[in-house]
């Protein structure tokens, strides 16, 4: 904002500089991970594009506030305040715990059962949690914790569509058994469904895994910028008209991305490996 003489007001300038400093401090914190627990000023400068003098100034302020610590000559690591916050109970300790408030909000908005589907290291998924609809006719998951192949159902396909193309063949290889009369068993047809799901930002399934149930699910990503699971709505087909399916799909996609950004995902990071997926 400028005054009548075209001179920027000091308060506005200070506010803008303060926000910029926070943005830069966060950019520095994002440089640290399990592979790079300690970094020097030059490395941080290259990673963030900030000058070494700016990095040095920011690190000094961050060290005073225990956001970073000096681990050796001109090298830094994450500070004790971050560990204190992580162990305070204020932060979720599992993906399911992080997802639960988002799932509850979706359930309250549509009064349909919302599930959290978590990707396993084995390449399968499990139903790791649910928030049930209040309606008498509703889906209740009874197979929580049971590994399920990604090719089955909307949540699995939401996760699979968010994996890089090069990882699809191993999931589509081998026989795909028919669980219901509507199960897609042809690998080429499943790939078409995955392409469509990427364009929409969510996957759909009508009775493919459970007779009489429609599922809509969207992928969730974390700070690694990779898919870690999916949030899905499981709805009796009697309540899933096409226009409601579109509305619910859009909201599930939005909420899944809100959870993803809470977990540290960024659009640029996700699109680096899956450039054509719709987010938010």
Image: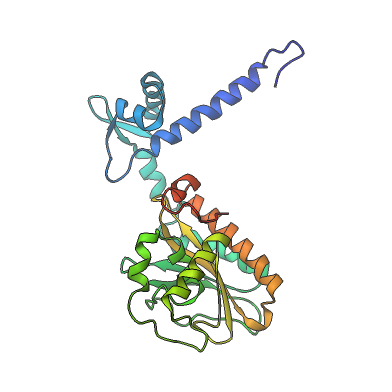
Q: Residue furthest top?
A: 5
Quadrant of the rendered structure where residue 126 is? bottom left
Residue in the image at 44% along x and 47% along y: 269
Pinpoint residue 128: horizontal percent, then vertical percent: 44, 71
Residue in the image at 67% along x and 83% along y: 238
Q: Is residue 250 left or right of residue 91?
A: right
Residue in the image at 46% along x and 30% along y: 24
Quadrant of the rendered structure where residue 123 is? bottom left
In this rendering, the answer to whether 60 lies above or below 148 is above
Q: Nearer the viewer, residue 187 or 132?
A: 187
In the rendered image, which quarter contains the N terminus?
A: top right
Quadrant of the rendered structure where residue 227 is? bottom left
Q: Residue furthest front?
A: 188
In the rendered image, which quarter contains the C terminus?
A: bottom right
Pinpoint residue 59: horizontal percent, then vertical percent: 37, 26
Q: Residue furthest bottom?
A: 181
Q: Nearer the viewer, residue 249 or 182?
A: 182
Q: Is residue 228 left or right of residue 7?
A: left
Total numbered badges shown on the rendered structure: 0
Q: Residue furthest right?
A: 4
Residue 105 visible: no
Colouring rule applied to residues: rainbow
Pinpoint residue 97: horizontal percent, then vertical percent: 46, 62
Residue in the image at 66% along x and 67% along y: 246
Pinpoint residue 205: horizontal percent, then vertical percent: 55, 76
């Amino acid at each position: 904002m400028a005054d009548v003489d075209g001179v920027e007001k000091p308060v506005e300038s200070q506010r803008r500089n303060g926000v910029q400093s926070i943005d830069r401090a966060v950019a520095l914190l994002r440089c640290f991970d399990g592979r790079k627990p300690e970094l020097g000023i030059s490395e941080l400068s290259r990673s963030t594009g900030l000058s070494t003098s700016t990095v040095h100034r920011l690190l000094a302020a961050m060290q005073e506030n225990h956001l970073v610590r000096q681990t050796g000559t001109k090298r830094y690591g994450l500070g004790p305040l971050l560990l204190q916050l992580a162990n305070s109970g204020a932060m979720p300790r599992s993906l399911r715990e992080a997802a639960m408030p988002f799932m509850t909000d979706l359930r309250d908005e549509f009064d349909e059962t919302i599930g959290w589907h978590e990707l396993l290291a084995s390449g399968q998924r499990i139903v790791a949690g649910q928030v049930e609809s209040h309606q008498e006719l509703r889906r209740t998951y009874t197979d929580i914790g049971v590994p399920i192949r990604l090719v089955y159902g909307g949540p699995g396909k939401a996760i699979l569509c968010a994996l890089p193309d090069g990882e699809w063949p191993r999931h589509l290889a081998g026989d795909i058994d028919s669980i219901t009369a509507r199960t897609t068993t042809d690998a080429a047809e499943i790939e078409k469904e995955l392409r469509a799901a990427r364009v929409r930002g969510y996957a759909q399934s009508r009775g493919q895994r459970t007779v009489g149930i429609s599922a809509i699910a969207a992928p969730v990503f974390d700070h690694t910028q990779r898919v870690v699971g999916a949030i899905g709505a499981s709805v009796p087909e009697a309540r899933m008209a096409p226009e409601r399916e579109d509305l619910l799909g859009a909201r599930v996609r939005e909420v899944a991305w809100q959870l993803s950004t809470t977990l540290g995902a960024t659009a640029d990071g996700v699109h680096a490996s899956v450039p054509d997926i719709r987010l938010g």
